[in-house]
Every structure is written in C-alpha cells, then in structure tokens.
Image (cartoon, grey):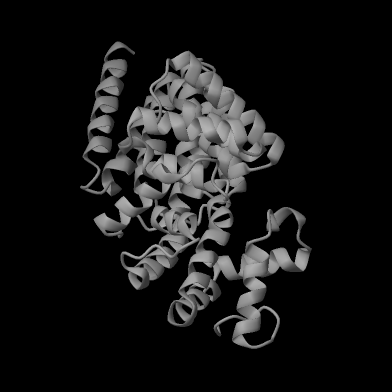
Amino acid sequence: MSDVEFRGGGYDEDLSYLIDLVEHPDPLRTATSSARAAVRTAAEGDQVVAAIERACESDPRMALRLVAGLSSYWWSRGLQDEAAAAAERVLGMLGRTVPAGLEEEYLLTVLHGASSAEQEQLELAQQVVLDGAGPFKYPVTVLLWALVFGPFESAAVVADVLARHERDGDAWTRAAVELIKGYPGLVDIAPAEAEQSLRIALARFRMLEDRWAMFLALTGLRQIATDLLPITTEAVDLASELGLEEEAGLLLCERAELHLRTATLDQARADFTEALSLATTTDNAEAVAAAQIGLARTARHAGNLVCAREHLAQLLATCPDDLPDAREEAAHELEAICAAEATA
C-alpha cells in the first residue's frame, strides 16, 4: 500500500485531507460515508503508519496531530496495538521535546506509547496534566489518562482532574468521568457508589452509542454488581459486535457458570458449547479449557457421568503444560465425578 491514498493527490494534499478528517469534532458520526470509510481504511491499515513516518521526517507537529486526532477512533475500535506503534514512532523522533501548543497531543502520544516511553517522557506528560486548568481538548484524553496514569497519581490529582472534566466537559467526557469513578482500582470509593457511577456511565455511553466504552463499563460492573446475568449477557453481545472473539468465549463461560448456579443446565450447556467452538476457532487454550471443564461439570450435574469423563479426557489430552490452573481445576472436577460415581 502506498503512503496515503485518500484523494489521489500529492502527499501534502492527502496528509492535509487526513488531518481535516481526524480533527473533525466527531468524524465518524457527522462525516460523509466516504469520509468515514477513508478514516477506517487509514486507521486499520498501513496508511496512517506511513503518513506518520513521513510526517516525522518533514513535519513533527503534523505527526503529533495525527496521533491525537485518531485517538478517539483507535479507542472506539480497540486498536491499541496500532495506536502504540504510531506513538512509539513519534516519541522516538521527539525525544524529550514537547512542541509548544501541542502539549495535549504530546500527552496523548505518551499515553498510547507508555509501555515503550522513556521515564522523562512519562514525567513530561504528567506535567502537562498538572499544568492544565480546564478540561482536555480531546475528550478521550481523560479516560486514557485515568487508565494509564491514574493508578500512579495521588488521590488529590485524580480528584482535581475529574472535577474539572465533570464540571466543564461534554456529554461523552462526563460519561467517562463516571466510568473512571466507578472502575475498580482507579478511585477509592464505596462499592455501592462505584456501582452507581458505572451504571450511570453505561446508560450515558449507551445513549451516545459508544459500544467500546459500554463494554468497559460492563467489565467494571461484572466485578462488583450482584445482578450478573443481564450484565454478562450484554457484555457477550457487545464482545460479539466488536469482534472480540476471545473475550466473547470467556464471557460465555462466565454466563454458563451463572446458569449452573441456578441449575438451568440447558442454557449452561449451550453457552459452554458455543464458548468451546469460539475458543477452538481462535486457538484460545485458556477458553478451551474453561469450556471443557464447564461441559464436564454440567454433565455431572445432569447425572451423565460418562459424558463428564469424556470432556475431561479431551481436555487433559490437549491442555498445554503452561496452564497449570486449568489442569488443577480439571483434577478437582475429576474427584467430584469419582465421588458421584461412588454414590450412584
């Protein structure tokens, strides 16, 4: 694929066109269908990487603007690897220089490339946050900051950042603040308050049709809520819509375990079976093991001990050595089967 192929013009024209697209306030909702397709093609392929590499050589400020402008899109599609690769290239070029007037763009780039950033780059990005007074220019910045830097910041800094975004941010930003407040490990609040914040965030993101943010809110709720079945069901559906096949397989196992608790064995068997199919397709050994053990447990509860043994035999014959927890759980299930056979 060539460097940038949006309009068929020269490099400078096409790069300017891409900047116009990604710096639109909400390019994927209000742009034309052809513009949205151009952003998708660029963000998910090689064109943005090529554009950023060329911009690093000729216009570093443009490279920063590209990373910042595409941040919301990368976030909404779960394209963390693409974002990290682009950020690493830009940070390698910038070193320890924060271009004047592009402080938040620098912060966003560090947030995407935090795993490979230098310590001084991390400190410079943190200083951008401390020097700020109002909400960030890019709404996604506050959420990425909370997820990457939040756990390492003081409670006072986190409270200040959230307060200014809750007060002055747009609808998406205020939803993100509720998500941050409720997400486990980010803010120290009571479980009931955290659950309320996550439910508010989920409702707001649902209205905004941000499925990735909804999925993150559901992930938090699954750790603290009591009505897990509807929450897990929505998470399963969203994972499928977002193309998160590995996550969908594990979520199906979680939902099947909930069915087992209420002795709805047909639903449990159906979920474990679907999870096994997904896990086999994606070569996810962890999910394969969870599904096979679940099917064995379901068969045992149904009184079909022969079938239960068959599932465990299949698992133990193929389970990798680097999944000792799965082998241990299978051994416990085998003991339960033996006990059931002894009393049959």
Report x, y in % for residue 2.
56, 85
Of residues 189 and 94, which is closer to you in this image? 94
Q: Residue furthest bottom?
A: 10
Residue 162 percent location from the top left of the image: 49, 32
Q: Quadrant of residue 42?
A: bottom right
With 77 as the anchor, is 85 left or right in this view?
left
Residue in view at x 30 percent, y 39 percent: 313
Q: Residue at x 54, y 17 (%)?
A: 227
x, y percentage for residue 319?
28, 46
Q: In the visual, does 38 lie left or right of 157?
A: right
* Picture layout, residue 307 above or below residue 248: above
Picture layout, residue 193 above or below residue 81: above
* Nearer the observer, 113 or 239: 113
Residue 327, compared with residue 260, is above or below; it is below
Of 225 and 9, nearer the camera is 9
Is residue 286 at least partly visible in the picture? yes
**Quarter placement of the N terminus:** bottom right
Q: Is residue 288 visible?
A: no
Vertical placement of residue 67 versus 311, above or below: below
If the image is split into quadrants, where does the C terminus sit?
A: top left
What residue do we see at 44% from left, 67% from top?
86
Q: Residue furthest top?
A: 343
**Image mark count:** 0
Q: Position of residue 206 (x, y in %)?
A: 67, 35
